[in-house]
Image (cartoon, grey):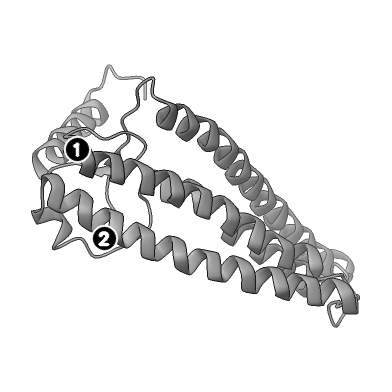
Amino acid sequence: MSGTHLIHDDDSRLSRLDRALFRLEARLTLLGGVLILALVLLATTNVLGRWLFDRPVNGYIDWVEQAMAFFAFLGIAYTQRLGGHIRMDILVARLHGRWLWGLEWLTTLLTLLLTLVLVYGSWLHFRRAWEIGDSSLDIDLPTWPAKLVVPVSLSFLALRLALQLWGYGRALWRNDPRPVAVPLLEDTASLAAKEAELMLETDDPENPS
């Protein structure tokens, strides 16, 4: 399952690379958010144009189809860094120390290998669309930009997984209780304390928020 995660950092090379990559991932995610906003505005324009002037946006469905790839994939590495992807952690939550880091290292390695296969396949898919001039059915919108964003985003995910593989490997080697550059699931007591603090802040009438 998905939960609240901590990411520790320090002055090591791994942590510096983690923070540098995270800045790029955050920009990609911001771009995805901007595109979602643009799609919302496009949908509003389409509805109002159809209702008021009987003139919907030309090729609206084509634009929506192409935009899907952008906001579906641009934030994938950002989410991986924060540990936001949904997964089953019934077993992982019971492990500690080297057993935990070893299992995380193994699952991260398998995910990295799968991601590299997907990068290769999606890149071939993009090249095919580029070479044949593939376009949408309605307004002949080129499909290669939407197909290019997939291998690019997955490449950032591969870099993130490689850094996390390094982080888990270092933690396994050192038996480090506070590894850096990897998402650490908070325990139940910490989560409960944060939720209680949040509820107290919400119920406080003097709190401006």
Q: Residue 161: x, y in percent?
A: 44, 51
Q: Is residue 183 visible?
A: no
* Above or below for 169 versus 193: below
Q: Residue at x 49, y 32 (%)?
A: 17
Residue 198 seen by the camera: yes
- Which of the two residues, 1 or 127, is positioned nearer the viewer here? 127
For disc 2, the marked residue is: 1
Kind of residue sitting beneath label 1 = Glu
| Residue 43 higher or lower than 166, as above or below | below
The structure residue drawn at horizontal position 76% and vertical position 58%, both measured from the top left corner, is: 42
Q: Secondary structure at mark 1?
A: helix
Residue sitting nearer the eye, 55 or 142: 142
Q: Earlier in the sequence, mark 1 or mark 2?
A: 2
- Amino acid carrying mark 2 in the image: Met
Check disc 1: other Cα within 10 Å, few if <14, some if 14-19, many if 20+. few
What is the quadrant of residue 203 in the picture? Answer: top left
Q: Circle 2 — which element?
A: loop
**Mark identifier at residue 135:** none
Left or right of 44, for residue 74:
left
Q: Is residue 203 left or right of residue 209?
A: left
Residue 26 vs residue 12: left or right? right
- Identify the residue position indicated by label 1 in the image: 195
Instruction: Kindly give the residue lying farthest to the front in the view shown.
Output: 173
